[in-house]
Structures are given as structure tokens and as C-alpha cells.
Image (cartoon, helix red, strand yellow):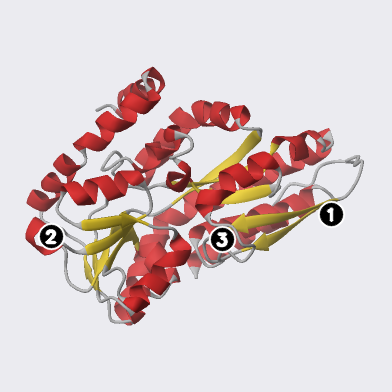
Amino acid sequence: MIMKSVLGSIGVAAVMLAAPAYAQDVKWDMANEYQDTSIHGQAQKVFTDTAREASGGSIDITNHFGGSIGYKSKEHFDAVADGALPIANTSMGQVAGIEPMFLLSSLPFLVGSAEDARLLWEVARPKYEEVFARNNQVLLYASPWPPAGIWAKKAITSEDELAGVKTRAWDASGTSTLINAGAAAIQMSWADVVPQLATGGIDAVLTSAEGGTNAKFWEHLSHFSAINYSMSLNMTHVNKDEWDALTDDQRAALLTASEAASDAAWGALATRVAENYADMEANGITVIAEVPSEFLGQLSAAGEQVYADWLEKVGADGQAILDEYRAQKGS
């Protein structure tokens, strides 16, 4: 795939640090609830490979994809803060109940493109870093999800078609918006989605074409309606005590690796959606790429309360981020 060749070339091109000095070798286990074939998994491989190269082999990070280390995304934040995990790649909307600032990237219909999503990330990054620092952690980089839509057993292009459909969302924002629009929505960790689809516990999933493709949703569902709900973020974060124990050269190596992984993930968006759609259609999924504007307007109205609730929790910091984002975007 195009993306894999791009990721590989970035990893190979990682800059080696001159004559580094290391106090000791570091061996970490890195948690990720999503598959290694996902945009986040592929970028994470760039991160760990580059960290190993740039540190002269003194940083060895073992990847644990698909939740195989035993932690779900909603558990990562506390686990890294407490030192139970040294490092994790986390779907941030799932920990917004701990720190509401993390709901920002999945606020409904806030971004309309990859450029918008990256601008929002850059504007908000200093505040994200403050939140991690307050919780004994260091933020390294973010990787984006392609736009979220609705996977279901039918086209979802109107409120009538959405009404009563048992739909999984990944965070409180999506759950609230879907409920307000008439769905029977529930917040659910990624690891639970396929088992619930298989047993009929849910009939639809709010996630990207990327997420459903990696999980082979075509084994359970037949349609994808591209409502472009949001482009939420995963973030990679490390325990602050582990970070402080590194040498300056090792920390520099991790920053080099973080930049390489970030560039790989954001760069992959240009082709990833088209690749996903091709895979989906080859496996029998009907892709509704153009959803009626009337329905999109109804969904947007259903999400208005989400903004009010979020701003009530985050206060002036949240409003300042939205104002700066919109000012830089020119809207």
C-alpha cells in the first residue's frame, strides 16, 4: 500500500544522533487498543523503530496492539500516570471522563478536513501538554483518525433511518449527539465492538472507514454513511518518572521518533480514505459518500448541547481554543 511505503521510508530516514551517551538501556511495553494495520499502529511502528535507531539501540519498545497487553484505551491514562504502563497510544475521547479537555478533537462537525484537524491539534497542543503534566505524564505526539461515519446494516441518511438503531460511539460526545438525533446510542470500548456486533448487542458503529476496515466490519455490516462527524485523535504519552530517568540524548531520540511518527500519521491521511473505500467496496460494503445536507444539519443541531456541556466543564480554556482555531481557520 502507498501508506506503508511512505511509513517505511520515513522510518529508514530517521536521523541518527551524533555520539550519544546513554546511562542505561530502556525496555518499555507500549499499549495500543487498535490493530497494527491501523493508521495509529503503522505510525507507532515508525515511532518505535525510529526510537531504537536514534538512540543507538538503547531504547527498545515492544508494541502491544489490539489491546493484547490487557488495557483498554479508557484505562491507559491512569495506568501511565501511575506507572503501571510506561507508555501508551490512546484514543483520547475515551478518557474525557477523566480530563474533559480530551473531548475537543471529537466535538461534532468542528473540523471539515485534515488541514482543519491538524490546525486544531496545533492550537490546542499547549493545553493538552498542561493536562498531561498535571497527571505525571509527557505528551509525545498525536495521530488522527480519518473522518468518522456510521457503519450499519442499512444506509443511514435521515433521522428516520437512524431512529432507534443500537449504535456504538467511542465517547460521550458521539453518544450524546446520536441520542439527541434519535439513535439508541451507547459508549463502548473498541475491544468490545466486534463481540457486540456478533451477538446483536449493537447494530451500528460510529467510527471511521479506517476503524471498520481494520476490524473487517463487512463480516457483520453492509453500509457506511460518510457523515464526517469528527476526526478524533489518538495521543502517545509517557510516564513522567520514566521520562525523567532518561538521559538527555534518549529524550532527544524520543522526540525525533515522535516527529517521524506524527509526520507519518498525518501524511497518510491523503490516501488512506480512498484505500479504505476500495477495500470496503471489494468486500461488499455500500459506501454512501454523499450524505444529504438536511440530515447533516439535523445531526449538527443534535450536537449543539455537546458544545455547551463541554464548555461548562473546561471553561475559558476551551473557549479560547475554539476562538483561536476559528480565527486561524478564517471562519
Instruction: From this view, report whether residue 125 is shown above or below residue 316.
Output: below
Residue mark closest to the camera, 3 vs 1: 3
Q: Which residue is mark 1?
A: 57
Residue at the image position 65 percent from the left and 35 percent from the top? 138
Image location of residue 34, percent across then percent down: 52, 62
Residue mark closest to the camera, 2 vs 1: 2
Furthest-top residue in this view: 316
**Residue 205 visible to an observer of this rendering:** yes
Mark 2 residue type: Ala
Residue at the image position 22 percent from the left and 51 percent from the top? 178
Report the disc number at residue 227.
none
Q: Earlier in the sequence, mark 3 or mark 1?
A: 3
Mark 3 residue crowding within 10 angstroms, few (<14) / some (14–19) / many (20+): many
Mark 1 residue type: Gly
Q: Which residue is mark 3?
A: 41
> Which structural element holds mark 3?
helix
- Could you say which quadrant of the image residue 46 lies in? bottom right
Instruction: From this view, report whether residue 201 is shown above or below residue 259.
Output: below
Toward the viewer: 251 or 6? 251
* Discs 3, 2 touching: Cβ within 8 Å: no
Residue mark closest to the camera, 3 vs 2: 2
Q: Disc 3 versus disc 2: distance between alpha carbons?
A: 34 Å
Report the disc number at residue 163.
2
Instruction: From this view, report whether residue 210 is shown above or below residue 80.
Output: below
> Which structural element holds mark 1?
loop
Image location of residue 80, percent across then percent down: 65, 44
Mark 2 residue crowding within 10 angstroms, few (<14) / some (14–19) / many (20+): some
Image location of residue 172, percent across then percent down: 34, 45
Q: Earlier in the sequence, mark 2 or mark 1?
A: 1
- Could you say which quadrant of the image residue 301 lies in? top left
Mark 3 residue type: Gly
> Which structural element holds mark 2?
loop
